[in-house]
Image (cartoon, grey):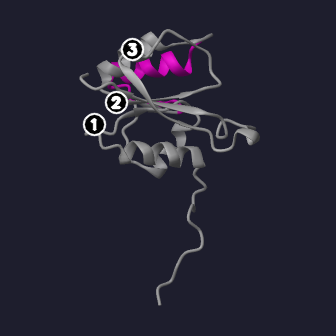
Amino acid sequence: MTWQNRFTNWYKVPEVVILLDDWILNDDAGLEKTAVFPTPVNLWVRQYRPEIELPYEWTKVNWQSDAAAELYWAIEEAEDAVDLDVVNAWAVQGGYNYIVLDSAETYVGTLQDYEEVYRVDVDQTQDTNAYDREYILYRVAAGR
């Protein structure tokens, strides 16, 4: 008889993070698993799937990379709307193959080098916090 653990999510990682991370890791496009996640969902990525490389999490930024620093400023420190043209340029330069956007944020511009591949909203009737909202996953477009 094999002992089965009745707890499958010991660290209480939000379901939205599990779904996004698993989608990225199961994507068979042959891309490195490098991704930009917004705060606060990025706080959980390294804990759940440390093989996904991030430019920053919370305020811990890879300051050795201009792209990582610029992505942090563009996404996390935007005064009004997040400029997706800037995000696109720095994500491409930094080699980030996936970008996750929070649908509740305000954006201008486009992710011209990325294509939408997945959307997740765990329970639309229960959207009470940042972990319940809809998130959109983009992947660098083929040929980039």
Q: Residue at x 34, y 30 (%)?
A: 97
Q: CA distance from mark 2 to mark 1?
A: 7 Å
Determine whether label 3 and label 1 are within 8 Å by CB.
no
Query: Residue 60, percent across and down?
Result: 47, 32
- Ranked by sequence position, the earlier of labels 3 and 1 is 1
Left or right position of 136 against 129: left
Q: Please give the residue where the numbered disc 1 appears in the rendered image.
A: 31
Q: Are marks 2 and 1 in contact (CB under 8 Å)?
A: yes
Amino acid on which disc 3 is placed: Gln
Mark found first going from the N terminus, 2 or 3? 2
Q: Secondary structure at mark 3?
A: loop
In this picture, which residue range is highlighted in magenta? 58-78
Left or right, 96 with reference to 2:
left
- Name the kind of residue labelled 2 in the image: Asn
Foreground residue among 114 and 8: 114
Which label sits in the foreground, 2 or 3?
Answer: 3
Q: Position of residue 20 (x, y in %)?
A: 49, 42
The answer to which image quadrant residue 52 occupies is top left
Q: Earlier in the sequence, mark 2 or mark 1?
A: 1
Binning the other alpha carbons within 10 Å of mark 2 as few (below 14), some (14 to 19) or many (20 upward) gives many
Quickly name the residue at label 3.
112
Image quadrant assignment for residue 10 = bottom right
Identify which residue is drawn at 57% across, 44% down. 16
Looking at the rendered structure, the kind of residue marked 1 is Leu
User: Which residue is under mark 2?
Assistant: 97
